[in-house]
Amino acid sequence: MGAASSDITPKSTITSINPATKQPIGEVPDMSAADVHAAIERARAAQREWAKVPIEQRCKRVLRFAEVLMERAEEVIDLLVAEAGKTRLEALGMEVVVIADLTRYFCKHAPEMLEPEPVSLHLLKHRASYLHFQPRGVIGIIAPWNFPFSIPIGETVMSLIAGNGVVLKPSEVTPLIALKARELFIAAELPPDLFQVVTGRGPAGAALIDGGINYCVFTGSVATGKKVAAACGERLIGCTLELGGKAPAIVCDDADLDRAAQAITWGGFANSGQVCASVERVYAVDSVHDALVDRIVSHASSLRQGNAGVDEVDVGAMAWDQQLNHVEKIVQQAVASGAKVRTGGARGPSGGLFFQPTVLTDCKQDMDVMRKEIFGPVIPIMRVSDEEEAIRLANDSHLGLLAYVFTKDRDRGKRIAERVEAGTVMINDVLNTFACPETPWGGVKQSGLGRTHSIHGLRDLCETRHVNHDRIAMAREVWWYPYKPSTFRALLRGARLLFGKRFWQR
Ligand code: NAD
């Protein structure tokens, strides 16, 4: 348990459950607003000192976290399997490795990314500007349960490198992994108060925004994201919002069907489909639809599902019961409206929170399964006449996080990708760019605001400040007092020369 929690006397607790067995695995305090505010103040005091450390030194110290993480990788993987129901390979590949790599990447490149940036002035040549990037202070991170390590800890690493302190409010479904991460930061000898973890439910997240943080990075549902944006607006602090997704996969008539089917199967079922970038709907062009469906059904029905804590499995458990209920309901509704179950379609092995890898065909655009986020191991497939129809239906959504296009023609793929309304479009691949720290992650439409990862995400964790200075010493500027008719005439002549028709025709 983190030091933050040892400073308080909890009035109530939250029990963490292993979703593969439904057995309790730990308890954490459900912190009050006062507890959360005290954690912010501890982080703020530590951050004042941390910000004075040159960025190269900060990177050196944060890099030690990646080393400790790799030394203790099994410990983290075991907890991810136990608390989130993941398979061991997913815990390693989608959580631990992603963070080890992101940490190394930003420790190497952040000093350059946050170097002051000159801005040359196109008109006032006797002056010049530059941007410099200062830490914001304390970053509040509010996290979901689906990637309880790689989402908030990537944001934490980037925040610390940028010179901030962090207070993380993990999901109430997966609090233990956040406390484990804090343990690793302390083992890496980072200042213990710099990174605080506050455990609790929604009100603890609200208290975090209310408690004087300087910026909020929120990842979660659209509904909560709107509340977070409103609360940040009330306090006039900025926020990055990483919200839901409904990623379409467009399969063109010239696609490599073997690759497309494998990618869609993995993209729909990895992490039990609880990925904001999951393949949530497939639009397959008529001429390849049947062959694609046969391949996906064949892959899906060969997957092994169960408790990754004891068995070797391909698909693990759903993280919590409410999500399982939601998936069951949305599949039942789709079937009642005419969708056909080609494999799966019901709860999985008894004893845990499992839903079978499910493939649905004959889906229609107006079904909930094609419109609402499923966030479970379900691949709904719809037959379309051509790629134009596929693009139109892909864009017919309030969400726009990820999208996928399958075609052997790279130029055609790019043309389609540029017409699809999504923060990221991948051609002939799925999910992976979350593991590329140099690329921006984030959505358009109601999938969110701002970006995490990349130079853009790093700079969002800083205040971009601007300094404007003289290049040539001058006694005065011509437009200063006193205002004289001769100055007006001279300025007008100059403006006509610069901005008038004759100037632009030259
Ligand atoms: P959620 O919105 O229910 O909860 C997210 C977090 O917000 C939790 O820590 C919760 O305790 C907290 N919270 C709840 N009410 C709050 C309030 N009023 N103020 C502040 N914090 C509050 O989401 P979830 O069910 O944990 O996560 C699943 C959702 O997250 C899905 O929609 C998924 O698509 C999305 N997600 C998006 C991304 C992305 O990168 N865009 C990544 C992962 C998950």
Image: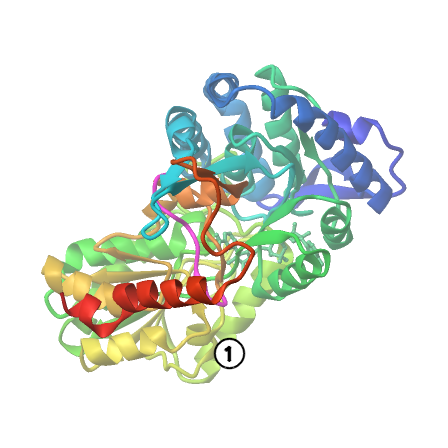
Side of 147 relative to 300 (left or right): right
Q: Where 365 falls versus 177 (above or below)?
A: below
Q: Position of residue 296 (x, y in %)?
A: 26, 60
Disc 1 is placed on an element classified as helix
Q: Where 97 falls versus 282 (above or below)?
A: above
Residue at 69% across, 47% down: 172
Q: Position of residue 124 (x, y in %)?
A: 37, 49
Residue 395 can be seen, yes or no: yes
Give, as a single range, the part of the protein colored magenta.
437-446
The residue singled out by tag 1 in the image is 333
Quadrant in which ligand 1 is drawn? bottom right
Q: Give 460 or 354, whichever is nearer the viewer.
A: 460
Q: Where 429 falls versus 341 (above or below)?
A: above
Q: Position of residue 485 (x, y in %)?
A: 47, 67
Residue 130 in which image quadrant: top left
| Picture mark count | 1
